[in-house]
Image (cartoon, helix red, strand yellow):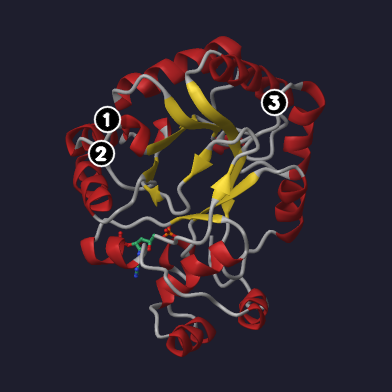
Amino acid sequence: MVKEIQFTFHNGVKIPNIGFGTWQIPNEEAYAAVTTALENGYTHIDTALAYQNEENVGKAVHDFQLAREDVFITSKLPAQIKGYDETLQAFDETISNLGVDYLDLYLIHAPWPWTEIGKDCTEGNIQSWKAMEQLYNDGKIRAIGVSNFSESDIQALLDECEIVPMANQIPFYIGRDQESLLAFCNQHNIVVEAYSPLATGQILNSPPILEMAKKYDVTPAQLCIRYCLERGTLPLPKSTNESRIAENSQLDFSISEEDVRTLGTIEDVRED
Ligand code: A2P
């Protein structure tokens, strides 16, 4: 983990600076993966109802016997669930799956269902957000946010709702810097969480990344994850492999401003 970098939401809640991502970790592998992450010092675990692994994420956290306040748990409202009552129901399902009585961070997973990317669901998002505000005010969630939201998706919430989102979780990695969205979030004091900081593994063989990693005597994955921190985003690397889980949290180096700029010029090589 990284001592010198801290993230604090606009309500004062602190979030550990590297999260263990569990997207694409099946439920049967999630227990071992999360246990390994906790053994390696991760105290921040990111899951979602849609990942279908909350049950074993929660079991691993429970069995590890950390005090509840010493572990930070994020989950997400499924992208296709929009509306006030529907959100309250999905939240109950999540905390029951996880076996906890509150969440540290709850996010709207996406502004539209994954089967209808780009659909205008503004009204549904506003209703979901109002339910999340209610859960937050009731003390059931310590921070609320969004994921995959564009500037206009966030602006719609700012226009209609009380609470400014505390986080926006977006795909962010070398080659996909999302400059204007990052600036918008910074301007509104919204922490940007970087999911797929390794572009799901697809940028690790990129020659300029390999070359820069050599210069710093780190692995390409460590360079990519540290890059997210240098850009002010909070990385959520995912792995099911013990040595890679450990490697991804050992980030005790820094990248010079000049090299951050150089890495920022790399083009997106990922094929979606
Ligand atoms: P594995 O789970 O076998 O380690 P992202 O975090 O961008 O979604 O990337 C996740 C992908 O990158 C997974 O396929 C994961 O595979 C792989 N990965 C994670 N950490 C490393 C690492 N340190 N070195 C190489 N590949 C990694």
Q: Is residue 260 above or below residue 84?
A: below
Image quadrant of ligand 1?
bottom left
Query: Where does the image place residue 260, in percent across and percent down from the top left?
Result: 62, 76
Tell whether circle 3 marks a residue whose Cβ is less than 8 angstroms from ligand 1: no
Mark 1, Cα crowd under 10 Å, few <14 / some 14-19 / many 20+, is some
- C-alpha span from label 2 to label 1: 7 Å
Marker disc for residue 27 = 2
Pointer 3 residue: 163
**Up-down relation of residue 171 to residue 14 (above or below):** below
Q: The N terminus appears in which quarter of the rendering?
A: bottom left
Tell me if 62 is positioned left or right of 108 in this view.
left
| Eye-nearest disc, 2 or 3 | 3
Q: Position of residue 11 (x, y in %)?
A: 62, 32
**CB under 8 Å between callouts 2 and 1?**
yes
Q: Compare marks 2 and 3 and give the one earlier in the sequence.
A: 2
**Residue drawn at point x = 37 percent, y = 55 percent:** 238
Q: Are marks 2 and 3 in contact (CB under 8 Å)?
A: no
Which amino acid type corresponds to the residue marked 1 in the rendered image? Glu
Of tags 3 and 1, the one toward the viewer is: 3
**Mark 3 crowdedness (10 Å alpha carbons): few <14, some 14-19, many ≥20:** some
Decide which of 133, 126 is in the foreground and name it. Answer: 133
